[in-house]
Amino acid sequence: MITTTETVAPAGQYKDDFCLQNNVDSTKIDSNFASQSYWKDVRYRFFANKGAVVSFLIIIFIIICAFLGPHLTPYTYSEQNLTQKNYAPRIPGLEKIGIFAGNEKLNTTTGTKLLNHYISDNNTNVYYWFGSDTLGRDIWTRTWMGTRVSLYIAFAAVLIDMLVGMSYGLVSGYFGGVIDSGMQRFSEIVNGIPRLVIVTLLMLILRPGIKTIILALMITEWIGMARIARAEMLNLKEREFVLASRTLGASNFKIIFHEVLPNIIGQLITQTMFSIPTAIFTEAFLSFVGLGIPVPQCSLGSLISDAFNSFTTHPYQIIPPILVLALLMLCFNMLADGLREALDPKMKEK
């Protein structure tokens, strides 16, 4: 009988023994697998999108300027002073270093001529931060007042989408059959009427203004939201949680707005954000062609339309409203893209 004796080495004697890991960086838990709520995950993915965050901050800044900007100067949006018309931008403090000092170059038949109406008219104590227009009105105040009007119309479009389009689409998709067919035929008829025709007819009946433009948006702008809501309802209404609620005796209203709606709120928010720049552009276009905000009120579109006639001689008058309009549309589109990526788990980076 052969017996063998095994020798057990003390712990830590060989290199392949287990040792405690003291490197903190290598023992971190992967955040992708950490347990967290849906909205916390949405917030994490949204703030990881630098473009969306910067766009959101720019939008907040523009909104603040729209409500506080007109109060920073002594002028009103409708005040005219023909003795101070076509003044170039002049900002206190910056004119001392040669920037925004009120100088303007005019191209004439004999060459380029440098003018400064502040000095020639002996108005050295007068400041127009964005300059003045052909009627002597302050462009700074009018730009932010026009931005305020455009934002009013944009957020009115949001309410229209959420109240009219969302409800219409959810009801149509939920009941289906004859109800769905009739509602879809009606929406196709409304969508087939050009928006410009609707606005023109409304101008013949109602007075031009913000209410008329909002009414025109209310007639046509909800179609896109209704289609999104209907498609999502058709996708979810036969799911198990909906069938369970129906079996337990839940009413149609509760199933639509308490069971289905919370599951598609992300897609609806994204569609709503995309509708904002569309509404802003629609208002700007209508004001540009003369079917928008009446004088002396102003919007970004009417400001661009007024400054377009003097673009070749005084280009500074058209730059502020164009920049604000471009920033609003660009930032809202980038914000909508960021929200879509954050709210849709399928777009989460793997």
Image: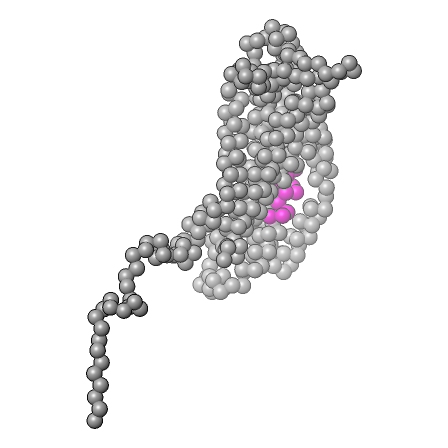
User: x and y percent of residue 39 in the render?
Assistant: 44, 50
Is 138 drawn above or below residue 349 in the view shown? above
Farthest top residue? 122
Farthest bottom residue? 1
Write the residue at 57% across / 40% down: 332
Write the residue at 66% across / 56% down: 181
| Residue 236 placement: quadrant | bottom right
In this rendering, does residue 7 appear at all? yes
* Number of marks drawn: 0
Inspect the magenta stretch and tell me whether residue 100 lies in it.
no
Q: How is the image coloured?
A: one colour
| Residue 11 placement: quadrant | bottom left
Write the residue at 59% across / 25% down: 143
In this rendering, does residue 163 appear at all? no
* Magenta segment boundaries in residue numbering: 215-225
User: x and y percent of residue 256 in the render?
Assistant: 51, 54
The N terminus, quarter of image: bottom left
User: x and y percent of residue 316 in the render?
Assistant: 65, 22
Write the residue at 60% across / 48% down: 225
Provide the major secondary structure of the magenta segment. helix
User: x and y percent of residue 71 in the render?
Assistant: 51, 20
Inspect the magenta stretch and tell me whether residue 222 lies in it.
yes
Is 295 drawn above or below residue 15 in the view shown? above
Q: In this view, does 303 lie to the left or right of 342?
A: right
Front-most of residues 279 and 178: 279
